[in-house]
Image (spheres, grey):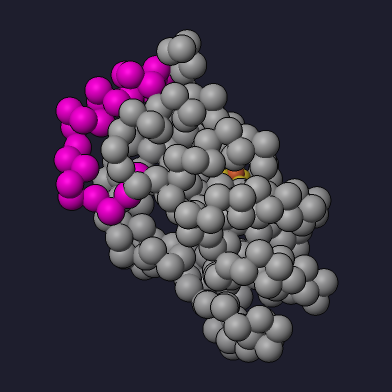
Amino acid sequence: MQSEIARIKEIFVSTQGEGPYVGYRQLFIRFCACNLSCRYCDTDYSYKNENRVYSPQELLDFITKEFDPAHIHSVSLTGGEPLLHAGFLKIFLPMLNTKYYLETNATLPDKLYEILDFINIVSADIKLPSATGLNNTFEKHDEFFRTVRTNPKINLFAKMVFDENITEEEITAATNLAKKYDFELILQPKMLNNEISPSINFADELFSKCLKRYKKVRLIPQVHKFLDIR
Ligand code: SF4
């Protein structure tokens, strides 16, 4: 069935700038639209007239013509929220022989379930209301991580964007989730105009606090902002 289509903002090769895969060369497919609206969002995922609508076959043709998969580590499915396009992905993902790296806000477990067998790496978010300005989504995250763990082949980690407003309850909830589902928790300081917005001292103290609760915690800022690449 080839009736699914997806609105795609951009397709490009660049270097992963976040989390434990920082520095790997990836082909990024940025999907339009998101189900959240985080206060700190720095991504233009809106659909504009110049963006294209692709069928799975059209996307495959475009990628195989324009890019050489031999020179990339994996294909990053990003957005926006790529899981809003799960119907499209279910058809497209098995068409290309590559590793898939899913960047997701981790709030759509049912959609993830549809494509779980094709994903190799899940880069999930843990959204903190103190940073996003949104309601708490910890229950959705819990359901999401439970779904990921039904596929033991997936390498899962989660990034947590924070600023100086982070609360004790959020620290406890995030480290408990990481412990429960046994994944690396990446503390990612919020960036403001390409500068880290919480102070370095604050970030370091938070790092120590989290490490006391859970060992697999790392502090990794957005490296692509320093390199000035997308
Ligand atoms: S989930 Fe990601 S893409 Fe969506 S609004 Fe939040 S930061 Fe932006």
Residue at left offset 62%, top offset 35%: 111
Residue at left offset 25%, top offset 23%: 61
Is residue 223 visible in this depiction of the protein? yes
Q: What stretch is highlighted in magenta?
A: 51-75
Relative horizontal placement of residue 21, taking residue 176 as reference (left or right): left
Where's residue 214, x and y in %? 66, 81
Residue at left offset 44%, top offset 62%: 18
Of 146 and 193, the residue lying toward us? 146
Is residue 52 visible in this depiction of the protein? no
Residue at left offset 33%, top offset 24%: 59
Above or below for 20 versus 26: below
Where's residue 78, x and y in %? 46, 43
Does the magenta run of residues contain 118? Answer: no
Where's residue 185, x and y in %? 58, 70
Image quadrant where residue 228 sits: bottom left
Above or below for 153 versus 219: above
Above or below for 198 versus 70: below
